[in-house]
């Protein structure tokens, strides 16, 4: 949800949820992307570095937000934006160069106040294994003061909660 250069949108290809098996997701995703792990994503153990997942979480959130009509430029125009208060990541299996991953995201909590919770699930395409799950608590802020603010109606309407679990 930033205009930072720490990730490139082109690294993640948007795909339809229907292009993935329904039973791999812990909840029906609102947005799915696909990427291939590159050698530069690896750490000394030759698997994907944990910090890379955080970059991908931010990137998929920004892409989903843009699909909902809320880019960083829209935040500036509205005077409201979203910043991360906390991240939680649970690594379930390692990934390696050449692995193709599906990255799903959905909003699991949004009561229209200042914060919302966005969930993430990373699934390896080749064996349909969940390799990482996580969530971020995003907080709406006034972009002039940096202080938390109640979400404007445009945020509440865009960032709707998914209620139905698949599994």
Image (cartoon, rainbow, N blue to C red):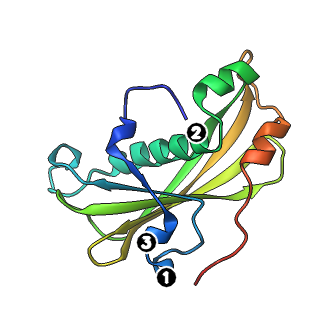
* In the image: residue 76, left or right of residue 4: right
Within 10 Å of the Cα at label 1, are there few (<14), some (14-19), or many (20+) other Cα atoms? few
* In the image: residue 44, left or right of residue 53: left
Picture quarter with the N terminus: top right
For this rendering, which residue is in front, 144 or 69? 69
Per the model, the C-alpha gap separating discs 2 and 3 is 21 Å
Pick whichever of labels 2 and 3 is earlier in the sequence. Answer: 3
Residue lying at 60% horizontally and 81% vertically, measured from the top left: 166
Image quadrant of residue 161? bottom right
Image quadrant of residue 106? bottom right
In the image, which disc is placed on residue 6?
none
Residue lying at 71% horizontally and 49% vertically, measured from the top left: 159
Residue 134 vs 151, above or below: the answer is: below
x, y (%) of residue 46?
A: 14, 56
Say which element carries label 2.
helix
Per the model, the C-alpha gap separating discs 1 and 2 is 27 Å
Residue 84 vs 132, above or below: the answer is: above
Count of marks, rendered view: 3
Say which element carries label 1.
helix
x, y (%) of residue 25?
A: 51, 74
Per the model, the C-alpha gap separating discs 1 and 3 is 9 Å
Residue lying at 50% horizontally and 66% vertically, measured from the top left: 17
Give the mark toward the camera: 1 or 3: 3
Residue hosting label 2: 66
Say which element carries label 3.
loop
Residue hosting label 1: 23
In the image, which disc is placed on residue 20?
3
**Circles 1 and 3 in contact, beta carbons < 8 Å:** no
Within 10 Å of the Cα at label 3, are there few (<14), some (14-19), or many (20+) other Cα atoms? some
**Residue 79, visible in the rendered structure:** no
x, y (%) of residue 88?
A: 53, 55
């Amino acid at each position: 949800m930033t205009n930072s250069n720490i990730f490139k949108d082109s690294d993640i290809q948007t795909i339809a949820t229907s292009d993935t098996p329904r039973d791999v997701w812990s909840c029906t995703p609102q947005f799915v992307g696909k990427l291939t792990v590159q050698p530069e994503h690896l750490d000394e153990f030759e698997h994907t570095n944990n910090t890379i997942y955080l970059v991908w979480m931010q990137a998929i959130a920004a892409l989903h937000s843009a699909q909902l009509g809320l880019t960083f430029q829209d935040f500036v125009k509205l005077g409201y934006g979203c910043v991360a208060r906390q991240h939680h990541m649970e690594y379930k299996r390692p990934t390696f160069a050449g692995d193709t991953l599906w990255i799903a995201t959905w909003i699991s909590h949004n009561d229209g106040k200042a914060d919302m919770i966005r969930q993430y699930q990373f699934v390896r395409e080749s064996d349909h294994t969940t390799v990482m799950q996580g969530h971020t608590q995003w907080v709406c802020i006034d972009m002039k003061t940096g202080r938390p603010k109640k979400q404007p109606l445009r945020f509440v309407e865009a960032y709707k909660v998914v209620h139905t679990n698949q599994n």
